Amino acid sequence: MSGVVVNFENQKAAKASIAPLMQLVGEDMTRVNTLILSKTGSEVEMIPEVAQHLIDSGGKRLRPMITLAAAQMCGYEGDGHVTLAASVEFMHTATLLHDDVVDESDMRRGKLAARMLWGNEASVLVGDFLLGQAFRMMVEVGSLEALDVLSHAATVIAEGEVMQLATAKNLETTEDEYLEVVRSKTAALFAAAAEVGPIIAEQPASTISGFRSYGTNLGLAFQLIDDALDYGGNSQEMGKNTGDDFREGKVTLPVVLAYRRGSDEERNFWKEAIVSDTNDDAALAKATELLRRHEAISDTVLRARHYADMARDALGPMPQSAHKDALIDVLEFCISRAS
Amino acid sequence: MSGVVVNFENQKAAKASIAPLMQLVGEDMTRVNTLILSKTGSEVEMIPEVAQHLIDSGGKRLRPMITLAAAQMCGYEGDGHVTLAASVEFMHTATLLHDDVVDESDMRRGKLAARMLWGNEASVLVGDFLLGQAFRMMVEVGSLEALDVLSHAATVIAEGEVMQLATAKNLETTEDEYLEVVRSKTAALFAAAAEVGPIIAEQPASTISGFRSYGTNLGLAFQLIDDALDYGGNSQEMGKNTGDDFREGKVTLPVVLAYRRGSDEERNFWKEAIVSDTNDDAALAKATELLRRHEAISDTVLRARHYADMARDALGPMPQSAHKDALIDVLEFCISRAS
């Protein structure tokens, strides 16, 4: 374990293959961004401020891009996909705002979390506002089936968060139980984002279920890679944003695996660290050493690879196209982040 | 694709590592077998005949052995595990009888299926009788929690079978949808078999969920390996019992993968074979060639490996013991069958 901080952003950019997707949906994405800006407007001054803070803080906007790509790939020709994509991003932004309050996070994407600037109350309520706007936009599109899928996802995400709350700091969590949380809290929105494209393009049920399966499994892979990255991924160096999950006492898959594979003495270390909050730099260094010793990080990446493979096969029957290639590139991009 | 038939039983025996499990539970298993014999008794003559036919036909009795091993491993000292193990085997036998009717199978484990000897009606009703006996035995044990787990499994299995019926011959089935069926129809009973041991041994919830997770993932791996074996597994030769799933038009994971990875022309072949029942030896040879070309069999084995790895980690926190080793050997045995 070297302490050297390397520039991960450059390394990632060189491997990144999300570029074809960005290229294909670029024009529509400009319309999504304009729509997002217009829909955060409110006479209540704090709302655009808080929403803007998070929206400006530069996520990859992967979810709305998937909605756009799926709709384009299915030959959709209206404007509904732009509105649904914005709606998906609002749902995501709302859960980030609420998550930070629940997790008592100070930082989000390297910036102060909204709750640190405007307080918990504002974060909760602006999240609710965005969720409300998301529903209004979905209704505008007028597809009852898309509404059903997205509103169902909203419920499942909330259920997932409550499930996570109930199992927080529980080191006895099995991999199955952890995956169940990830399925709800992360994969459900990816699934809905992918599914609404073919739905508004009026595709047959088999196409819709293929996209849903792509989204679900991309979501699982994405979250597991995120978990691995929080401990530096397969790289031997720790990046600057590593260790957040550890400091917040989150029981993610690398910890589940290391805990289950460890000795009684090691399990006591994890209890001290996660349950009793002994999570300083020395503890993080020891945690990382244990994770590597038990191959918990590399196996988390292997598990993610399984779901990425499932996602790739899910798209199998769709005709060859630049969009299909781009969506498969997203899977490779996702896995390559951790290497 | 050579047409040579090799003696698979010998190859398997050399690799088999189910022996330690059989050794550990041998004494209890003798009691289970005695109990099974006594509980198939009925004044209605056909019942013991039909039941005996299936019971004699020599399955590995993996499920009851897992119940026994789990209970022993958790230090259980009563007799309840023997009764629950018999009950688990009865549930399994009942589903085999019913399955053969639903699938219109002629053969079962290389012998004529019960329905070919006594008819469909007898197979259905004797299955119901065994299910009834299974419930009576569970009740005898007197653990409401074990009763809850096993009766819930019985419902889930039936749901899985109905789900399978609804999706039968549907080549558009996604891997996720197929896994959902396997989770219900196969994994649920393995999970219950593993879980009732720690339950009657009054273990903490975390131990119970660890065993449940072991059972679930062993069940998934077991079924996927079965699917791969039906097309000869990773071996280049076809065994004598291969091709049954193909001839019955079953859409198992190897077919799901080959269909999704194939060309339009290949997909037409699968439709002819599975939907229109063009499933003679020539079609089977072509199917096997396509499965190998698209690595659908080897990837099915890889997917099974993922679940076997999850099962192994699920048992991680249990103290080292011969029983734990034996249960982990079962996973390796399961995967090695296909190589």
Image (cartoon, coloured by chain):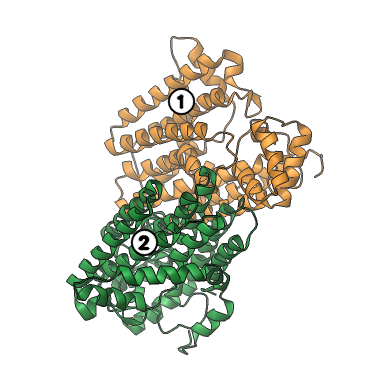
Chain colours: A orange, B green
Q: Relative to residue A280, is residue A117 depicted above or below?
A: above
Residue B35: which disc? Answer: none
* Residue displayed at 50% across by 83% down: B8
Residue located at (45% from left, 88% from top)? B3
Q: Position of residue A241 (x, y in %)?
A: 69, 34
Check disc 2 and give the amino acid type: Ser
Q: Secondary structure at mark 1?
A: helix
The residue to which callout 1 is attached is A36
Position of A227 compared to A187: left or right? right
Nearer to us in this view, B194 or B226: B194
The amino acid pointed to by label 1 is Ile
* Mark 2 nearby-residue class (10 Å; few <14, some 14–19, many ≥20): many
Report the mark closest to the observer, 1 or 2: 2
Instruction: Assess whether mark 2 and mark 1 are in contact (beta carbons under 8 angstroms).
Output: no
For the residues beneath circles 1 and 2, the answer to whether they share a chain is no
Read off the residue under disc 2: B87
Q: Estimate the x, y position of residue B194 in percent, counting from the top left.
A: 47, 57
B150 vs B220, nearest the viewer = B150
**In which chain is the residue bearing label 1?**
A
| Residue A66 % position (x, y) | 46, 42
Specify whether A41 is left or right of B210.
left
Q: Is residue B224 at all visible to an observer of this figure?
A: no
